[in-house]
Image: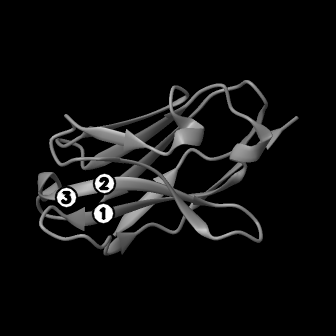
């Protein structure tokens, strides 16, 4: 029910924008988040955005470089990634949760981001 796109190979210092389209009836009922998983590591939270798009939070390592936004009319959440570093290399996943819940219940299949040095 969630499909990510936009991942590719990019040089360090470059930018990418990931997109995630979610197939739900009322997208604004859901908070959204991006996670990432590097090879041999656990999946980590990157950042999240609330249902209205007015509140966003980020893990420290991406603050000031990544921005999450959403378009509720298009059922889409975005992850704008600037000043990319090799350590940002990972599979990036979007996830959705109903506003009243703590657990993310809908996940995409992931999109690969590779940052070369």
Viewer-nearest residue: 111 or 49? 49
Q: Which image quarter holds the N terminus?
A: bottom left
The local secondary structure at tag 1 comes to strand
Other residues around mark 1 within 10 Å, as few (<14) / some (14–19) / many (≥20): many
The answer to which quarter of the image holds residue 49 is top left
Q: Which image quarter holds the C terminus?
A: top right
Q: Position of residue 91 (x, y in %)?
A: 64, 59
Circle 1/circle 3 CB separation < 8 Å: yes
Say whether residue 29 is left or right of residue 69.
left
Circle 2/circle 1 CB separation < 8 Å: yes
Instruction: Answer with mark 2 or mark 1, whichever residue precedes in sequence.
Output: 2
Identify the residue at image location x=70%, y=25%: 14
Instruction: Answer with mark 1 or mark 3, whichever residue precedes in sequence.
Output: 3
The residue wearing badge 2 is: 32
The local secondary structure at tag 3 comes to strand
Measure the C-alpha gap from mark 1 to mark 3: 6 Å
The local secondary structure at tag 2 comes to strand
Q: Residue furthest right?
A: 117
Residue 97 to residue 6: above or below: below
Identify the residue at image location x=78%, y=30%: 12
The residue wearing badge 1 is: 96
């Amino acid at each position: 029910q969630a499909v990510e796109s936009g991942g590719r190979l990019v040089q360090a210092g470059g930018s990418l924008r990931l997109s995630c389209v979610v197939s739900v009836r009322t997208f604004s009922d859901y908070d959204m988040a991006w996670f990432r998983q590097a090879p041999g590591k656990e999946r980590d939270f990157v950042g999240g955005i609330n249902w209205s798009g007015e509140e966003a939070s980020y893990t420290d390592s991406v603050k000031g470089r990544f921005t999450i936004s959403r378009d509720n009319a298009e059922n889409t959440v975005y992850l704008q990634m600037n000043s990319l570093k090799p350590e940002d290399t990972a599979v990036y996943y979007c996830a959705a949760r109903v506003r009243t819940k703590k657990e993310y219940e809908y996940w995409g299949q992931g999109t690969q981001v590779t940052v070369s040095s």
